[in-house]
Amino acid sequence: MRAETSWRAIAVALGLSGATLPAMPFVAGPALAQSAQSQAAPEAGGAIELPTVEVVATTPLSGTGIDVDRVPGAVTTISAEEFNRLQSFSTIDALVQYTPSATSTDVQGNAFFQDFRFRGFAASPLQGTPQGIAVYQNGIRVNEAFGDTVNWDLIPEVAIDRAEVFSNNPAFGLNALGGAVSIQMKNGFTYHGFEGSVQGGSFGQIGGSIQYGGEKDGVGLYIAADAVRDDGWRSHSPSELARFYGDLGWKGDKGELHLVASAASNSLGVVGPTPVEMLAADYNSVYTWPQTTQNDMGMLALNGRYDLSDTWQLQSNLYVRRFKQSHVDGNDADLENCSNKWNPGVGNTKMCLEEDQFTGPTGGGNPLSNPQYAAFRSQMVLYDQNGNTIPFNELASNQLYGVINRTWTDTTTYGGSVQAVSTDKLIGHDNYFVVGGSVDYSTVNFKSTTELGITDINTLGVAGTGIYLQNRPNYSLPEEYQVFYLPVNLDATTTYYGLYATNAFDMTDRATLTMGARLNIAKISMQDASGISPQLNGDYTFARINPIIGLTYKITSDVTAYGGYSESNRAPTPLELNCADPNRPCLLENSLVADPPLEQVVSHTYEAGLRGASTLFGGNMSWKLGLYRVDSDNDIIALASEQTGYGYYTNVPATRRQGFEAGLQYVNGPWKLYANYAYIDATFQFSGTLASPNNPLATDGEIFVTPGDHIPAIPAQTLKFGLDYMVTDKWKVGGDVIAVSSQYYAGDESNINPMLPGYWVANVRTSYQITPNIQVFGLINNLFNQKYASYGTFFDTGYLGLSNAQMQTPGQPLSAYAGMKATF
């Protein structure tokens, strides 16, 4: 333990005014807090045993914090040691492994592009996934402005000092419906020395990292970089990551200042789910390709703190962040030669959308009685980029028409926040008061195109033809018909304001009352930049005050009870606002065509629990138990359209996520172990009809949901445990197991189909310290080569003539890696 940390812990334990601590690292799973060493008490002439103090920051800015036993909610702290233990380049792995109610969902079949799900809410990199977790890096919100997505691949795992996962806390602002993740990075004052590592193994993976940190005369420097190349274990799914993080800091008697730079350039092969009939024939197969995502990010930030007095501290940050994403997606397509059904006399000379899926124009009738028929017929006929109709040609027997969808998102965000913390006593009692505010302003440009492609039925590769689709020769159609393959060029701005205050008041030396609130204001403005889609234009404002109230009570010196109530909200994103009409669906990663209003989501969280730390059989044990219920009003979900590949967002009246979670950590000599269990009951709380056109048991493409039906893609139970053992003072062995119960397929909101089976996976690892500075290590993931899937959905079987509508994203099979690490 660093000397500075020890003295600060001692100061807080003795109740010295103004003392604060950074959050402490731990040694096995969620935090086993650092203990202050026994110190002599001059007035008593002997030694006293100081209590264990674990400090966390309960707001985005974390230069100061509060004893976790005074926090009326669930908290999981993950140290740099725990991230390093897994020898993974993916930040998701440690967050999921050590957080009781956390799971990962691999929708896209790429270890660097997975969802983090906590209590049934998602922080996902995938456009189209409704988001519900707020994520911060050094106090900077990294939920992307366009769709609230979180690109975990942009965060270099090697540079993480610690991560804290909180249950619902409105202080973290928009999108903290289910909770928040706060990641703190290393700097020259918290990390000293040099470390370099290289590793490689299965599926062509080769990668490495370096980091250096040091300080002299109040100046600290930290730099880190990592890079990895992986061919991917499934076909056509290679990835390349290159990431950098740097921190130049200055520290004085009363404050410190940091200039931070971060950058990444990552190419990700994201091949998505595959029909189960194809997986049965070839476990590595993919359903249409190419599917690639390119993420580029650069950020500069200035953050610091200043002690205004012994009991008041001021913190702030300023930043600018540029994020660019391009996505290429080869897909199937419902294209056919124009028939006589809606277009009499057209014959087989033009290319149309699949007409059998259309029920006719609004108002019905016939071409003579309904003038909308002309527009309706024109809607189906496809045109190229020059406004010419496209001849429908007969393809070879091993070919089908397909499309290549491309999107480009370019976002620049400017932001800042300021926060004041006071530890002044209130009417003679200890008190912790925080007040702060933030502004995040983003400009977004989103573009999309659709290119006509030809799919090789043997490889399912889609090759472009150079013809870019449009759905009409001019732009005079009523907007209700301007759908499907419409190119998009959208400019948007988002401005998010936040103002919050929280207060933790020690009513007694055992009981702490926490009260607070946050005001969120979201302003969203969108403007069609093409001049051809005025329906995209819109201005929206969402505002809400979210409260928090909670109580903690120290039953004994080792056991604390907590309970609380809080609310959070999230505003619909520009992506969701422009894709919210079932009559005008959009390709969720490609087109935006509709803008009916969506309501903001509001979550109401009730939770209670116990946590404690004690000694057992000569070792240190910490544990926690928790119960929670999260009721969400106007929850946003994504639904599929009858047009293949298309969908839309909609509000549903009410959902509920409730459950139980437990965690245990134990350290005794050479042994370190942890275990986490979670049960979640995630259900809809309304009756109504939802679209699910690919669900094989749907009626006319619709299903009926009743209260108590389970939300798809959320497993009810998870169990995770791990063990490390020092065989000698140089040789360590260990492993982890994760078990996940069954879940419903996405698109089965009425729970009428068989469930996606549960699974379990075991991983083992070992390391040997050859010299004090050189270590070799190895690991095997999925030791028993289990075949499993963490995500399932449905698709239109007609494209390939298959019979089973289920498709899954299979999990990675047995894989082995080895490497070497040098530390100085």
Image (cartoon, rainbow, N blue to C red):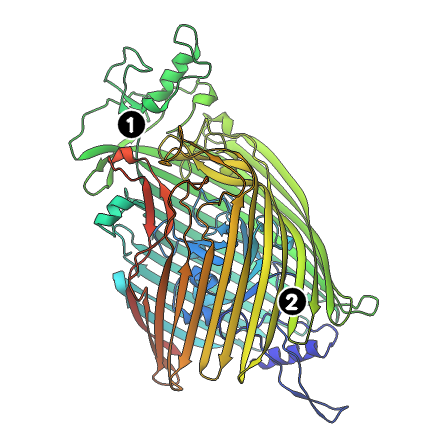
Between label 1 and label 2, give the one nearer the viewer.
Answer: 1
Question: Residue 538 appears in which quarter of the rendering?
Answer: top right
Q: Secondary structure at mark 2?
A: loop
x then y, percent, for residue 218: 59, 75
Residue that numbered label 1 is attached to? 335
Q: Nearer the viewer, residue 187 or 569?
A: 569
Report whether 439 appears left or right of 477: right
Q: Secondary structure at mark 1?
A: strand
Q: Amino acid type of disc 1?
A: Leu
Tell me the quadrant of the picture where the C terminus can be found: bottom left
x then y, percent, for residue 810: 32, 52
Residue that numbered label 2 is attached to? 64
Residue at the extreme bottom: 45
Q: Amino acid type of disc 2?
A: Thr
Report whether 151 appears left or right of 273: right
The answer to whether 572 is drawn above or below residue 473 in the figure is below
The answer to whether 254 is drawn above or below residue 451 in the figure is below
In the rendered image, is residue 638 in sight?
yes
Tell me the quadrant of the picture where the N terminus can be found: bottom right
Report whether 703 appears left or right of 597: left
Question: Residue 392 appears in which quarter of the rendering?
Answer: top left
In the rendered image, is residue 383 in sight?
no
